[in-house]
Each structure stands twice: as C-alpha cells, then as structure tokens.
C-alpha cells in the first residue's frame, strides 16, 4: 500500500507488481497509509486535513475523519481495529472511534508538526513524535504518561517493540544519535551509534520478534540492524 503526492493511494500485488486498486478522493498529498488488523479496510491521511477509511475490496470511502486544522502527517490503527490515531501539522494527534467517526481524545504537547504516531501492542497507550521529543499517552484516559526528550533533533519516526517494553525513536538529519531505544518503565535510553550514517533516520521499525530494526533515511539504502550488537 502506497500513498502519493498525486492525491491517491494504491494497493499493489507484491508478487506480480501489478496495481490491485487505486483509492481516489483526497484533495491533496496522501502522507500516511495503514492497513486495518483484519485487512478489510485501509486508512489514508492527507494534507487536505482529513483521513479516510476505505473498503479494500470495493475501494469505497467508508468514512472521512475531519477535525484537524492542518494536514494529516501520520495514521495508525489500534491492534483491535476499533480506534485510529492521526497526527497533524496542527501540532496535535487525535484518537478516533472507527465505528462512529467521533473524536475520543486530542493529544497536544508538541510545538511543531506531529511527524509520527503509533499504538502500543496492547492498544492501551499511544506514542506521538515531533520536534525534539516523543510523548506517551494513555489511550483509555487521555492522560500523558511520559515524555522522551531528544532536543537536538527532529523526531521523524516512533515505534513500539513487539513486547511493548521499549520504544524506538528515529531522528535526523545528521545527529550522531539518530536512532535511540528507550525503556518505557525506567525512561533510560540507549543510542545506537552511527545508525543512518550521515543522513539520519526518517523511518524505523522493529521486526516481529523484536531482535532487529529496519531503518530508512535520506540516503539510497535501508539498514537492517541487530538490536543487541547494533551491527
């Protein structure tokens, strides 16, 4: 699933490389895409200030989520698929009820664009990344739980480890600690030195077993790193 500056998202067949379906309806760049856990729907976020829920089989627009004052920069589904999270250039993230389309909580605290959003594996907390920090919130109460500060850089990517005990923060452009692992319980951090090379880290995620990390930056290569050895 890909989003594009041509205002569309496209679903592709991995083996053949053929287009399966094009999702059209946004009025500006599509800046975020996500698959629902049951694979029956997808979510797109756009610079037109909205997110749209689509039926994978028919391509039908099932619901439009409107509430941000500026473009939507990131989207995510909760593990049970009942809520979604959107981040925006309006410096907020919003938790939405998929069934009703209503806003559940608005998360503030960033002083610039929200660049990345993520749900914990159990769905009980959410993480938002922005300039200089990532903020952990309780998804059930809307209360702020912890702030992970990285004042020297933009935080472009946030992710939870599969066991939910660690968060991964990717930042750029050329900081030496562009990739940091944080222990959620203690708040201690472990930078992975020289990850991203001279280009920083714009995107990072864990493997399903949590033993490796895949990163992407402004360079022409992706990096696969071992969590323990950092190699």
Image: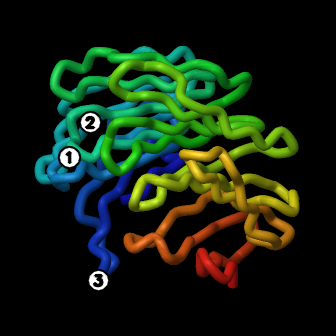
Residue 38 image point, x, y percent? 16, 53
Q: Secondary structure at mark 1?
A: strand
Q: Nearer the viewer, residue 131 or 143?
A: 143
Q: In the rendered structure, are the residues bearing label 2 and label 1 in contact, judged by CB atoms less than 8 Å apart?
A: yes
Label 1 to label 3: alpha-carbon separation: 21 Å
Residue 221 image point, x, y percent? 68, 78
Q: In the rendered structure, are the residues bearing label 2 and label 3 in contact, judged by CB atoms less than 8 Å apart?
A: no
Judge from the rendering whether residue 2 lies leftward or rightward of residue 191; answer left or right.
Answer: left
Residue at left offset 50%, top offset 26%: 93
Judge from the rendering whether residue 37 lies leftward or rightward of residue 188; answer left or right.
Answer: left
Q: How many marks?
A: 3
Question: From where the camera sits, is residue 196 visible?
Answer: no
Question: From where the camera sits, is residue 111 visible?
Answer: yes
Dot 2 alpha-carbon crowd within 10 angstroms: few under 14, some 14 to 19, many 20 or more: many
- Mark identifier at residue 53: 2
Dot 3 alpha-carbon crowd within 10 angstroms: few under 14, some 14 to 19, many 20 or more: few
Residue at left offset 22%, top offset 41%: 81
Give the mark nearer the N terminus: 2 vs 1: 1
Per the image, the residue denoted by label 3 is 15
Give the mark nearer the N terminus: 2 vs 3: 3
Residue 115 image point, x, y percent? 62, 39
Label 2 to label 1: alpha-carbon separation: 7 Å
Give the mark nearer the N terminus: 1 vs 3: 3
Which corner quadrant of the image does residue 214 belong to?
bottom right
Per the image, the residue denoted by label 1 is 41
Residue 55 image point, x, y percent? 17, 44
Q: Secondary structure at mark 2?
A: strand
Marks 1 and 3: which is nearer the front?
1
């Amino acid at each position: 699933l890909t989003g594009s500056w041509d205002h569309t998202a496209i679903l592709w067949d991995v083996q053949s490389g053929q287009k399966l379906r094009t999702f059209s309806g946004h009025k500006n760049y599509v800046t975020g895409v996500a698959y629902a856990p049951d694979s029956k729907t997808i979510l797109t976020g756009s610079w037109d200030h909205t997110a749209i829920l689509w039926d994978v089989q028919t391509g039908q627009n099932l619901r439009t989520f409107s509430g941000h004052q500026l473009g939507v920069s990131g989207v995510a589904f909760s593990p049970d698929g009942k809520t979604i999270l959107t981040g925006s250039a309006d410096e907020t993230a919003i938790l939405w009820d998929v069934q009703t389309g209503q806003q559940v909580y608005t998360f503030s605290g960033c002083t610039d664009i929200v660049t990345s959003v993520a749900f914990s594996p159990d769905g009980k907390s959410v993480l938002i990344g922005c300039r200089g920090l990532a903020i952990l919130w309780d998804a059930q109460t809307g209360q702020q739980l912890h702030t992970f500060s990285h004042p020297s850089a933009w935080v472009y990517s946030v992710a939870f480890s599969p066991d939910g005990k660690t968060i991964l923060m990717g930042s750029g452009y050329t900081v030496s600690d562009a990739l940091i692992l944080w222990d959620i319980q203690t708040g201690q951090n472990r930078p992975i030195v020289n990850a991203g090379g001279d280009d920083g880290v714009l995107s990072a995620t864990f493997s399903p077993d949590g033993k490796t990390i895949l990163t992407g930056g402004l360079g022409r290569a992706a990096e696969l790193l071992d969590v323990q050895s950092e190699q």
